[in-house]
Amino acid sequence: MQRSNGEHMGRVITITSGKGGVGKTTTTANLGTALALQGGRVVVVDADIGLRNLDVVMGLENRIVYDLVDVVEGRARLRQALIRDKRLPELCLLPAAQTRDKDAVSREQMIDLTGQLRREFDFVLIDSPAGIENGFRNAIAGADEVIIVTTPEVSAVRDADRIIGLVEAAEKGPPSLVVNRIKPRLVNRGEMLSVEDVLELLAITLIGIVPDDETIVTSTNRGEAAVYDHQSQAGRAFLDVARRLRGEEVPFPVLQEQQGMLERFFGIFGRRRS
Amino acid sequence: MGFFENLFGGRRDRSASLAKQRLMMVLVDDRYKLTPEMLQQMKVEIAEVLSRYLPAVDAGQIEVKILRGEANDYLKADIPLKRGQPDVG
Ligand SMILES: Nc1ncnc2c1ncn2[C@@H]1O[C@H](COP(=O)(O)OP(=O)(O)O)[C@@H](O)[C@H]1O
Ligand SMILES: [Mg+2]
């Protein structure tokens, strides 16, 4: 996007959830990598001050010299703090401070920071902390768009509903939704909320359906995004989210039931599920 | 699509439907501070008011849903009217 004065204007997109542990950091890392793979200039920002995480998920933890708080407090310039991805030169990380408390940054500082980043990048993805307090408010302060991640569980959906209200009150426009950790086998048995159930309850636009997938565990162990793994259903789902974010119409594929070791084992004996 | 479509109906056996039903209740309460008891009372009072203008309305037949729209939520009530002799009393 181009401002009238010719200045480059990237999109600032915050990934948030309310409840912790539902997949914000996983989504940010994979979506950022996917957008860069698709040719965008991308920076992912870890706004979870005090609980630095995005660096290890992306395998960049050994390269950190300066962090976000160093930048806003003027100890480092933005360029010094940005860490370039191992494989993709157009992908950068701005790490969170690990030793500072979550109130080390103000909303104005975040707005200023995202304003600088959007001049250099096409996509500025912000990994939000859990909760509805300052950390969350800072994370959405400079955002143009908000993506809400939820799992198909009662508590996560409830918190997502609360967050939707807060995002709308902050006049960020209607957020879009990623439903993460879907287990098709449980959904088919009527033992897990379906994506349709969640959408009916939250009534926001769907942008991604990500299955619960063992490859997320293995790729996180390696510090590589799952989008590199062609065997990964979750990786493919994140690639689709990136394409939708860029305005492409991508149909939602039907998820395959994944079998764990135990099921495969029992499968030999022809055990049937009701 | 209906937000609180199944608020009062349907057989529930699988845990997913139970989860959905519980969520519907919790979200009405979170958003509007409206408990299931209050919702029930509201229907009784809606029936009372309408009965002043229309042939007997049965509170038990009223179905109230809350639908989420773009900018607002909407309260939608389905109120069956008993067809029969017009009451000219
Ligand atoms: N689709 C998925 N399949 C399997 N595990 C997942 C999936 N998404 C997230 N996880 C795991 O769940 C945990 C929490 O995810 P994370 O992205 O750190 O959540 P958050 O940032 O919201 O706290 C991590 O261990 C992560 O590997
Ligand atoms: Mg996180």
Image: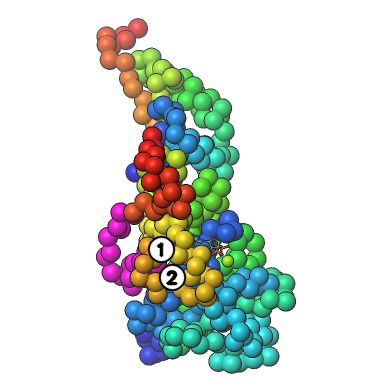
Q: Is residue A244 magenta?
A: yes
Q: Report the image quarter containing ligand 2.
A: bottom right
Which residue matches tag 2?
A226
Total numbered badges shown on the rendered structure: 2
Q: Is residue B17 left or right of residue A158?
A: left
Q: Is residue A194 magenta?
A: no
Residue A45 appears in which quarter of the rendering?
A: bottom right
Q: Mark 1 falls within which chain?
A: A
Q: Is mark 1 within 8 Å of ligand 1?
A: yes
Q: Residues within 10 Å of mark 1 (few under 14, many from 20)?
A: many
Spatial CA span between label 2 and label 1: 7 Å
At a point 37% along the width and 38% down the height, the residue shown is A272
Circles 2 and 1, Cβ within 8 Å, touching? The answer is yes
Q: Position of residue A141 (x, y in %)?
A: 55, 71
At a point 33% along the width and 22% down the height, the residue shown is B80
Residue A81 appears in which quarter of the rendering?
A: bottom right
**Both on one chain, marks 2 and 1?**
yes
Please name the amino acid that badge 1 sits on.
Ala
Q: What's the magenta region?
A: A234-255
Please name the amino acid that badge 2 sits on.
Ala
Q: Position of residue A208 (x, y in %)?
A: 38, 60
At a point 57% along the width and 77% down the height, the residue shown is A55
Q: Position of residue A100 (x, y in %)?
A: 72, 76
Disc ID at residue A234: 1
Q: Position of residue A35 (x, y in %)?
A: 39, 76
Q: Is residue A191 above or below residue A216?
A: above
Q: Mark 2 falls within which chain?
A: A
At a point 27% along the width and 11% down the height, the residue shown is B84
Q: Earlier in the sequence, mark 2 or mark 1?
A: 2
Q: Which element carries disc 1, helix, strand or loop?
A: helix
Q: What scheme was used to colour the molecule?
A: rainbow
